[in-house]
Amino acid sequence: MDLFAVRAVDRERKITRLIASLYEYGDVVLAKKLQRCQRNRLEHRRAVQEGMVANWPARCRSPACASCRNSLETRWQEQARRRFKALDVVPSTSSMITILLSVNGSLDHVADEITRTRQRFANKRRHGVWSNWTLDAAVEVDGMHAHDWSSLLPGRKETLDTLPKVGRQSGWLWIGSIHGFLCHRGFSRYEVSAILSEMWPGVRRVNVDPVWSADLNAGSDDVWIDAASIVSYGLKHSETTQLSHQKVDWPVEMQAVWWSFLCAERRGVEPLRIRFKAKKQISSASK
Ligand SMILES: [Zn+2]
């Protein structure tokens, strides 16, 4: 078997395990959806191997499906790229932002935190600040068991220790962090950093970094590519947690809890997105 085939078999095994875990967890709707998608896919593969003419299989398009996730991610990237391309962004007033939100005892707490964060951004904009800013961000959710807290790398642990703790800090913990691409016309990167750090005070909690293409002195085309990468980074679901010096896979029960939460009410990844755009384009406000 070639490497591609080995990966495909491995992926199907993981999906099968997730389906079983979803049934156990009680999310029959999502379990059946993934199961149907897998069955269609495998039947299609078998037909192709036997040299039969087969239509492209119907897919579930769920972010929980490791097979369908890639095409979803490509679409998110394309959206971000189009959005910032239309804005004519330049590296000097574009930044990648990372904000660590909180450590939560349940995913409902994470959802509340994201709602609160959207409100905080909206308030700022209502009061005339940031009206020229455009943000495309996703909240990345890291999961870990409370008893692994001591296994975090020292620097990471020190930072996470200073975050607000919401809910019971036993069992599984969920850490939300914003990864976004911000176009901040009218403000310098330093000013943006000061504003965000005041809103989310703490040790290394807020990072406002130049876009990668600015480092490389590349053309402005690449700024859109940065936008696409940062958004998909936030939305990526590798289902791993960095502990000590290695990445550890999420236990399958934890994956079931996570995907069930995210796919409820067919909302897909929308609950994780935080986006707003400049109210109007004033070229004189650029600097
Ligand atoms: Zn699927």
Image (cartoon, rainbow, N blue to C red):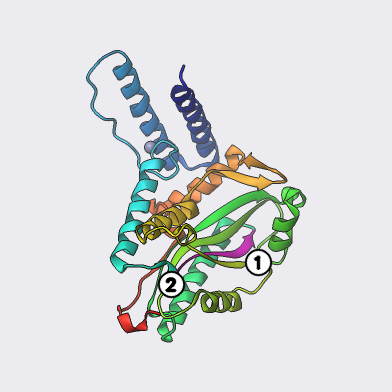
* Ligand 1: image quarter: top left
Foreground label between 2 and 1: 2
Percent across and percent down for residue 86 are: 28, 65
Other residues around mark 1 within 10 Å, as few (<14) / some (14–19) / many (≥20): some
Residue denoted by label 1: 204
Disc 1 is placed on an element classified as loop
Name above or below for residue 200 compared with residue 86.
below
Magenta stretch, main secondary structure class: strand
Residue 238 numbered mark, or none = none
The answer to whether residue 8 is left or right of residue 43 is right
Q: Is residue 282 visible?
A: no
Disc 2 is placed on an element classified as helix
Name above or below for residue 205 compared with residue 226.
below
Viewer-proximal residue among 32 and 40: 40
Viewer-proximal residue among 227 and 24: 227
Q: Quadrant of residue 45?
A: top left
For marks 2 and 1, give the CA distance.
22 Å
Q: Are dots 2 and 1 in contact, CB under 8 Å?
A: no
The residue depicted at 43 percent of the width and 80 percent of the height is 130
| Total number of numbered discs in the rendering | 2
Percent across and percent down for residue 241 are: 63, 46
Residue 93 numbered mark, or none = 2
Tell me the kind of residue under disc 2: Thr
The residue depicted at 64 percent of the width and 74 percent of the height is 201
The residue depicted at 43 percent of the width and 72 percent of the height is 93
> Which range of residues does the magenta coloring cover?
92-104
Taking the magenta stretch, the answer to whether it contains residue 280 is no
Q: Quadrant of residue 158?
A: bottom right
Taking the magenta stretch, the answer to whether it contains residue 99 is yes
Percent across and percent down for residue 98 are: 55, 63
